[in-house]
Amino acid sequence: MFSTNFFVLLFFIAIVGSVQSQNGEFGFFEKLHDLDKSLSPKQREEVREIGTNSSATKQEIIDNLKEFFHGIGGDLEKKFNAAAEMYRLKIAEISKKIKENQSTFNDEKAKEIFEKAGKIHQNMNITFAEEQKQIKSILETAPSEVKRKLEHIFWHSSSQHHKAILSN
C-alpha cells in the first residue's frame, strides 16, 4: 500500500503526461514534465538510472541528480533546482502534517507511530526500499484510524495528481 519511492515515482509519473494543477498554478508535476521534455534521450536515460538505483540512499539519489544537472548547467539545472525546491517544501509540509495529526490522538501508541513515521520519512540516509519496509513494519501494529491518517498525509495530494494524469 505504501510505495515510498516518492521522488522517483513522481518523476516517472510526470514523464507520462502533462498535468494541470487544479488551481492553475505551475506545480511540481508540471515542473518535472517540463524538465523531462528538455532532456535528450541519453540524458533522460541517465536520470532514470540515477533515480532507480535501489542501493542508493534517498540523499544519494538527490545528490547524484543535483550533480548530474549541475554538470549540464543552464536552464536544465534551473528547472531541476526549482523541482527539487518544490520537493523539499512537500517534505516539510508532510512533516508538519504528521506533527499536527500526532497531537490529535489521545492514545500514546498512536502518537508514537506518527513520530516514528515522521522520523523514518525524514531520514535521508536510507534507501526508498528501507523506508517502505520500516513504515510498513510500524503500520502492522497501528490502529486502522492511524493507518488512514498516515496514508492521507503521505499520499492525498499526489493521488489527485495521479487521477489528473490518468484522465489526460
Image (tube, grey):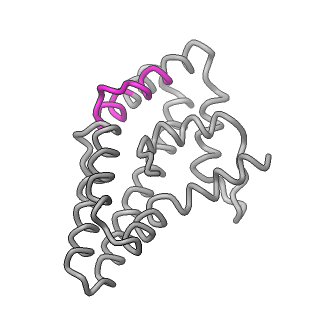
Q: Residue furthest bottom?
A: 106
Q: Is residue 49 above or below residue 61?
A: above
- Residue 119 screen position, x and y as percent: 23, 57
- Residue 141 screen position, x and y as percent: 27, 64
Q: Is residue 144 above or below residue 163?
A: below
Q: Residue at x 22, y 40 (%)?
A: 125
Determine if the magenta segment contains residue 160: no
Magenta segment's dominant SS is helix
- Position of 153 with respect to 95 (left or right) is right
Count of numbered tags: 0
Q: Residue furthest top?
A: 42
Residues 4 and 110: in front is: 110
Which of the 4 image quadrants contains residue 24?
bottom right
Q: Residue at x 61, y 39 (%)?
A: 13
Q: Residue at x 64, y 59 (%)?
A: 160
Determine if the magenta segment contains residue 61: yes
- Position of 66 with respect to 134 (left or right) is right
- Position of 57 with respect to 148 (left or right) is left
Residues 168 and 43: in front is: 168
Q: Residue at x 39, y 56 (%)?
A: 91
Q: Is residue 90 above or below residue 111?
A: above
- Residue 32 screen position, x and y as percent: 58, 39
In the rendered structure, which segment of residues is drawn in magenta?
Answer: 47-64
Q: Is residue 79 above or below residue 141?
A: above
Residues 91 and 138: in front is: 138
Residues 56 and 136: in front is: 136
Which of the 4 image quadrants contains residue 108?
bottom left
